[in-house]
Image (cartoon, rainbow, N blue to C red):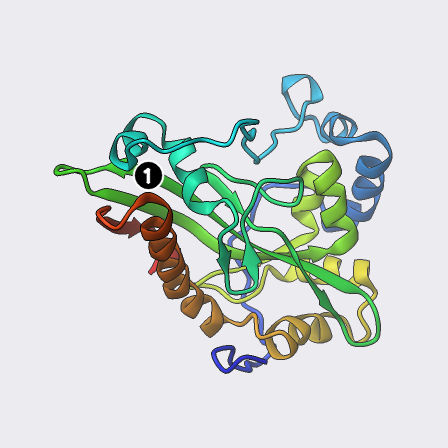
Amino acid sequence: MRAHKSEQSSQVQGAPSRRGGAVGRTPALLELQRSAGNAAVNRLLGAGDGGRAVVQRAPLSTERPLVESAEGLASSQPMRFLEQIFDGLRVDDFRFRRGEQGNLGLNMISEWVTVPLDGGGSLAVHLNCMVRASQLQGGAIRLHVAQFHLTARSTSTQRTIDTHGPSAATAGASIHINTSTQWGRPDNIKALAAEVAANGGETVLIQGLTRTTGYSHPYVKWLVDHFKERVRHAVQLRLGGGVELSWSGDATFS
């Protein structure tokens, strides 16, 4: 275990409640999604848009972009600019790149890391944040980062997302941690522990994330600073040493 990952207690503080079906419906909804896809889940839950899922991931361009002017690209084509910075970027355990496991764009999702649990079962953990690029007066570049957090869910649910995209069912089977919260919320932790059949239930589940792997609250705080370092290095390496970079963000990125 790396030194920057502190061992923490398994006490969990719940995150703010989100919309979705009852926890008890989650296994059945996941099975429906795996067998019939997102449309069937959303029709069952009364979603609009003809039952189509609202997929979080932005479409990826098929052509690798070339950067003529970092400043001009950030202003006129921010998505291409972000792809230039993040494609292949590794931030500690988490790598961003094009592919079905992750996403590049305004909603950055890293490839997932497998976390085995004592007594069987495993979790998929990824880093997720919203990133927006803008050009400031004088040609400097500002990156605004929001909703910076880690997500954990069962590997089987993660593979469902890789195939079909996210849905209300997968949201109810996921837990999150950021710089302001611990892993939560309690209902989702309970559902996830049952899904992965963790020996010892929720306690073992959280200990597997915070003590064994080190994905704790202090680690997420450290990860924010490390993220800035890695992105700044990528900007200098890929876009040239003359690019001035500044940051802004919400409470999760401070």
Number of residue marks: 1
Residue type, mark 1 in image: Ala
Residue at x 36% of width, y 39% of height: 132
Residue 54 in which image quadrant: top right
Residue at x 68% of width, y 17% of height: 50
Residue at x 70% of width, y 26% of height: 46
Q: Which residue is mark 1?
A: 133
- Which of these two is toward me, 130 or 18? 130
* Crowd around label 1: few <14 · some 14–19 · many ≥20 (10 Å): many
Q: Is residue 113 above or below residue 8?
A: above
Question: x%, y% of residue 87?
Answer: 50, 44
Q: Residue furthest top?
A: 50
Residue 162 in which image quadrant: top right
- Which of these two is toward me, 205 or 16? 205
Q: Quadrant of the N terminus?
A: bottom right
Question: x%, y% of residue 81?
Answer: 38, 36
47 relative position to 92: left or right:
right
Element class at badge 1: strand
